[in-house]
Image: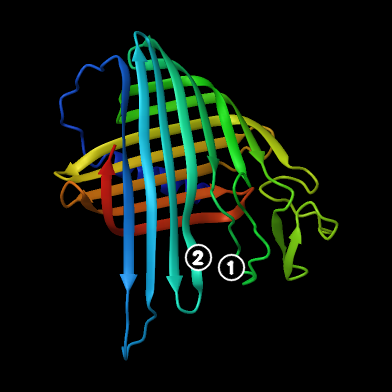
């Protein structure tokens, strides 16, 4: 765990320090500021009589990244919605998900001193459709996740350091985190070599789902939350967006820090086309005791709104 945390912090530090934003800072404009991007990534491969082998496949991912922020005097209210959904289809495996995410972030701040603000933040995460553990079972009768299954709600007071919209971080030492699941989620039982319903009588080994005990659908945590955001241009038409979130639960295993780091690299070709790379690393021992990695790369069609 310490090695994972050190590696991600080092990666963030290298990325964050790679370039300095040289654009002049404009005085923030009061009122609402809204804007976002819709992106569609497409990947496709086709083979016929190809001696080296290969399978025809096609995949697509649609995503929305939208901000709507409000400023009035010493008060600010920053909101961000991130949503994405992707599918891939191959001859042998059929159609499977490659991405499924919905996240809403909101932070209210009041000027304190310098770049510091008193703050209260809220974060909500879930997904859109059922997910399955294909590593253990090809049968899709046993969804291990789904819409609001789980859903995470995190909120708490803190202090925000905000130089501008592209460089800020927030520290919240008294953060509540709530995890919700439905009763029909399934967990893999290695002893039985199969799936059992989390809240069902067949869960004789008392397996948890996302840290929630059998028969329960809710988990509460109290801990320390830290988040950071940094976006900069490496060069003309190449931007890098970094989003980092850390959480330690005071009530149980505080040394096991939850990590969620996302890096989005956009290399613009023109107004509507770009090459996009997204890398996400997640560590949450209540979900799975291993580092989760996700990488999406492809040609993007972008629409601003």
User: Regarding mark 2 in the picture, which secondary structure is present there?
Assistant: strand
Could you tell me which residue is drawn at 63 percent across and 69 percent down?
Answer: 136
Q: Which of the two marks, 1 or 2, is nearer to us in this view?
A: 2
Dot 2 corresponds to which residue? 96
Identify which residue, 104 or 38, lies in the foreground: 38
Dot 1 corresponds to which residue? 134
Could you tell me which residue is drawn at 21 percent across and 49 percent down?
Answer: 272
Identify which residue, 277 or 8, lies in the foreground: 277
Q: Which class describes the residues within 10 Å of circle 1: few (<14), some (14-19), or many (20+)?
A: few
Mark number displayed over residue 166: none
Could you tell me which residue is drawn at 65 percent across and 39 percent down?
Answer: 179
Pointers 1 and 2 in contact (C-beta within 8 Å): yes
Q: Where is residue 211 in the image (x, y as percent from the top left)?
A: 69, 46
Lateral position of residue 23 relative to residue 41, left or right: left
User: Regarding mark 1 in the picture, which secondary structure is present there?
Assistant: loop
Q: Which class describes the residues within 10 Å of circle 2: few (<14), some (14-19), or many (20+)?
A: some
State whether residue 181 is above or below residue 204: above
State whether residue 149 is above or below residue 196: above
Identify which residue, 106 or 284, lies in the foreground: 106
Whole-Å distance between the Cαs marked 1 and 2? 10 Å
State whether residue 217 is above or below residue 109: below
């Amino acid at each position: 765990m310490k090695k994972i945390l050190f590696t991600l912090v080092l990666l963030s530090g290298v990325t964050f320090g790679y370039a300095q934003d040289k654009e002049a800072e404009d005085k923030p404009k009061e009122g609402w500021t809204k804007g976002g991007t819709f992106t569609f990534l497409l990947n496709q491969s086709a083979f016929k009589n190809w001696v080296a082998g290969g399978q025809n496949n096609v995949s697509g991912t649609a995503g929305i990244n939208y901000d709507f922020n409000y400023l009035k005097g010493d008060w600010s209210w920053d909101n961000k919605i991130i949503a994405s959904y992707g599918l891939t289809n191959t001859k042998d495996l059929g159609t499977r998900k490659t991405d499924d995410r919905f996240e809403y972030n909101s932070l209210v701040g009041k000027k304190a001193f310098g770049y510091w603000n008193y703050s209260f933040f809220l974060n909500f995460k879930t997904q859109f459709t059922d997910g399955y553990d294909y590593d253990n079972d090809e049968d899709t009768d046993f969804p291990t996740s789904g819409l609001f299954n789980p859903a995470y709600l995190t909120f708490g007071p803190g202090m925000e350091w905000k130089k501008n919209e592209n460089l800020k971080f927030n520290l919240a030492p008294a953060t509540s985190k709530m995890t919700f699941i439905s009763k029909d989620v399934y967990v893999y039982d290695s002893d039985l070599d199969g799936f059992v319903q989390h809240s069902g009588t067949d869960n004789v080994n008392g397996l948890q789902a996302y840290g929630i005990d059998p028969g329960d659908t809710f988990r509460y945590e109290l801990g320390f939350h830290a988040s950071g955001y940094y976006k900069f241009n490496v060069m003309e038409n190449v931007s890098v967006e970094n989003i980092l979130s850390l959480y330690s639960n005071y009530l149980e295993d505080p040394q096991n820090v939850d990590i969620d780091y996302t890096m989005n690299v956009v290399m613009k070709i023109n107004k509507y086309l770009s090459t996009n790379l997204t890398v996400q690393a997640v560590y949450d021992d209540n979900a799975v005791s291993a580092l989760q990695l996700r990488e999406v790369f492809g040609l993007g069609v972008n629409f601003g709104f």
